[in-house]
Image: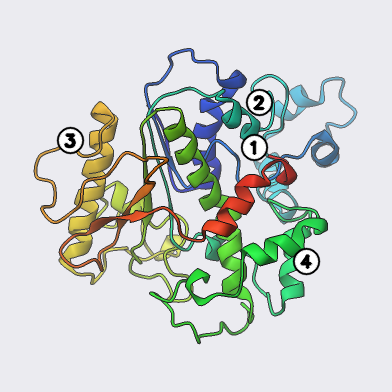
Amino acid sequence: MLYSWGESAGAGSVGWHLTAYNGRDDHLFRAGIMESGNPVPYQSYRDDRTYQPLYDNITALTNCSSAIDTLDCLRHVPFATINAVLNTTAYETVFQPIVDGDFIQKFNSIQLAQGDFVKVPILDGANTDEGTAFGPRGVNTTQDWINDITSNATGAFIAEQYVPSLLEAYPDTCSDLIPPPTEVPCNVTYPAPYGDVYRRSAAYFGDVVMIANRRGACETWAANGVPAYCYRFNTIPAGIPWEVGVTHFQEVAFVFDNVNGLGYNAAHSSVDPFLNKPQTYTELAKLMSSSWASFIYDQNPNNFTGRYAGAQQWPVYSTGNPQNIVWDVNATNTLAYTEPDTFRQAGIQWILDHALDYHR
């Protein structure tokens, strides 16, 4: 079983293993769980023209640049020294996998289109407001948003020639904003440091980083006759500001049934997700963790006793009738219900159709 959660790089590693060596199946695992990550990476692929200068700078700062084998030299640098170098803002999440023609043989979107992936069942999902974690702030005008979309400093960037059709696919429509009107009324404009166009921008960045490729993976698995169970997490834990909403990583405490809030404290600048919350929060954690355990056991998340009586069954994803399960404590007497996986259809399809233009 391949399993990574919450942080996109971790969950993305499951996707890379599912497509490794052009999808070669060495029978190393029988299923995969991807929380906020997918076979198509969340960033655009770069190459050594981006990373070599960064590596060279590291060797210079650690007195390894003149070594015959600079990599071996780095292996012997004291931890405190290299840790101090890597913990500067210049190296924050900067190194990512590249298409090397071996482990990653080509863009992952091409592999999925060609069926070159390990065909095992998956559980795959994302949170409603991923874009509040991955979208930039200070988006005061449409031009600010365009600048962010096309900047090669952005994780997933695209050429300016595509901007007109992209803006058309992401109109300034209330129902498409992030957080959505079910969380924040349509007439609420975010103040500084967010900006007037922030909610429209957040919808796009949540999709381009996480949600579009989650839908694309579910569609691909279904089209190839392989079971996929897909979800949207839609519950705001304790301690999360209203303007952030159901952002990245918030499902993790529920998946692990961490109802005691272990690891959440002031030292980690976090609040127990279940603090002063109603019993439905604990019940949702039990339902989700049991569903995950059931999938791990026999690849069916519905096969366990004592399942919450009101919760709908988690359907296998279908191309003809694509359905997510939604984990939502605000859903009266259900905690979990199905929805058509068609929200922001035009925008998400635009992103999927332009995967190669995003260099992934």
Which amino acid, by three-letter code, is at mark 1? Phe
Q: Disc 3 vs disc 2: Cβ atoms closer than 8 Å? A: no
The quadrant in which residue 61 appears is top right
Q: Earlier in the sequence, mark 3 or mark 2?
A: 2
Which quadrant of the figure has residue 204?
bottom right
Give the labeled residue for mark 2.
Answer: 104
Disc 4 from disc 2: Cα separation: 30 Å
N-terminal of the two: label 3 or label 1?
1
Q: Nearer the viewer, mark 1 or mark 2?
A: 2
Q: Find residue 147 and name its label.
A: 4
Type of amino acid at the residue the image marks with label 4: Asn
- Distance from Cα at disc 4 to Cα at disc 3: 48 Å
Separation (CA) of disc 4 from disc 1? 38 Å
For residue 232, say whether it is visible: yes
Residue 103 percent across, percent down from the top left: 64, 22
Disc 3 to disc 2, how far (Cα)?
35 Å
Mark 3: amino acid: Asn
x 32%, y 63%: residue: 273
Residue at the spot 40% in from the left edge and 58% down from the top edge: 250
Q: In this figure, which residue is indicated by the disc labeled 3?
A: 303
- Which of these two is toward me, 42 or 65? 42
In this rendering, the label closer to the viewer, 3 or 2: 3
Going from the N terminus, do you reach mark 4 or mark 1 first? 1
Q: Mark 2: few, some, or many residues within 10 Å (few <14, many ≥20)?
A: some
* Residue occupying the point 40% across, 20% down: 29
Q: Quadrant of the C terminus?
A: top right
Q: Nearer the viewer, mark 4 or mark 1?
A: 4
Asked whether the residues under the numbered discs 4 and 1 touch, taking CB atoms below 8 Å apart as contact, a structural biologist would say no
* Label 1 sits on residue: 79
**Mark 4 or 3 closer to N-term?**
4
How many residues crowd mark 4 within 10 Å: few (<14), some (14–19), many (20+)? some
The residue carrying pointer 1 sits among few (fewer than 14), some (14 to 19) or many (20 or more) residues within 10 Å by Cα, namely few
